[in-house]
Every structure is written in C-alpha cells, then in structure tokens.
Amino acid sequence: MYRQEDLEKVNAQIRRERLQFYVPAALLIAGGVVAFILRMKYLTMILLALGGVLFIFSADVMIAPLKAYRRHLQNALGGDQKEYTGVIKKLGDRPVEREGVMYYPFCLSVGDPENEEDDRLLYLDANLKKPDWHLGDRLYVRSWARFVSAWEKR
C-alpha cells in the first residue's frame, strides 16, 4: 500500500511549502526589524504583524497536515505492526480526522461476529482510493496502532 517513494514525495512537498511560506515571512520580519531600527513605528508594526501571521498560518494550515501525514507514512513503513484476519462488520462512509490525518473508519470482526470483544476499529487512509469493500468481506489487515498499512481480500 505504501512505498518509500511516497515518504520521499511528502518530504519534498514539505520542503517546497516551507520555502514558499517561510522565506516571505522571514523577509517581512526582517523588514520589520529594519523599520524598527529606522524608527518607523507603523511600518514596523505592519511588517512584523504580516510576517507573524504568514508564519503562523503556514505552519499551522499548510505544513502541519503534511507533517502529520509524514508521521503516518513513517509508522506505516516502519512502525510496530499488528496483523488481523476478519470480516468487515461496519464501514464508515465519511472520513474522520485522527492525529491530523483523514481516515475512513471500519470495524473488523476478528473472531465471533456476535461478540463485540472480537471487533477492531481500524482506520484506512482517506488520501488513497477508497477500496470496493462490502459488509461481510473477509480481509487480511496489517496495521500500526489502529491505522491500516496494508490489506488484501481473502
């Protein structure tokens, strides 16, 4: 499901986003420092405010989701893995956010479908194409924590 190239693509995207937003923010802040030295009160306030807003916006809105997805990929490729074989009991139709990444939730019964103790709530990456799963399908799933890193129908 995931390859090392996927992680490299996300790392490259993080670098691009940082350059795209942090360089202009740094220039605005540097301009604010120069305006402060030259005692230009209003220009100092405007440049520092714009630089700070751009920096916070880019860090929180643009880069944080990429870093969360990178963490997901790192764990999917090299984290502690658990394996389950079971029957799909429930399928979520809407993605949910967990640890900064969007996932489709689903319930896999790894034993007796009537026994809720045998149910496992797992999450499938919503950034990938949603598989054609149906209730009752038998799956083999490998996951880190509750997040699927590989699966196949059985």
Image (cartoon, helix red, strand yellow):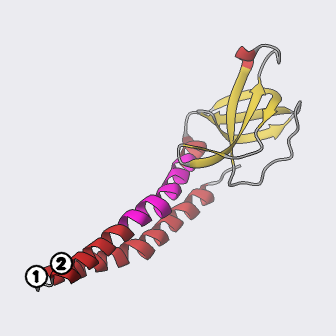
Instruction: Give the side of residue 136 with respect to residue 115, left or right.
Output: right
Residue occupying image coordinates x 51% and y 62%: 11
Q: Secondary structure at mark 2?
A: helix
Residue with the most extreme front position: 42
In the rendering, which numbered label is found on residue 37? 1
Residue occupying image coordinates x 41% and y 61%: 59
Q: Amino acid at mark 1?
A: Ile
Q: Is residue 22 magenta?
A: no
Instruction: Give the side of residue 151 with respect to residue 59, left or right.
Output: right
Q: Amino acid at mark 2?
A: Val
Residue occupying image coordinates x 75% and y 30%: 107
125 vs 94, nearest the viewer: 94
**CA–CA distance between discs 2 and 1?**
6 Å
Q: Badge 1: how crowded within 10 Å, few (<14), some, or many (20+)? A: few
The quarter of the picture where the C terminus appears is top right
Specify the principal SS of the magenta part. helix
Q: Is residue 71 magenta?
A: yes
Instruction: Give the side of residue 24 with respect to residue 77, left or right.
Output: left
39 vs 139, nearest the viewer: 39
154 vs 22, nearest the viewer: 22
Q: Find the magenta span and give its range.
A: 55-73
Q: Position of residue 37 (x, y in %)?
A: 10, 82
Image quarter for residue 119? top right
Q: Position of residue 148 (x, y in %)?
A: 67, 39
Q: Position of residue 124 (x, y in %)?
A: 70, 43
Q: Secondary structure at mark 1?
A: helix
In the rendering, which numbered label is found on residue 33? 2
Say whether marks 2 and 1 touch (CB < 8 Å). yes
Q: Badge 2: how crowded within 10 Å, few (<14), some, or many (20+)? A: some
The correct choice, above or below, for 32 with respect to 99 in the image is: below
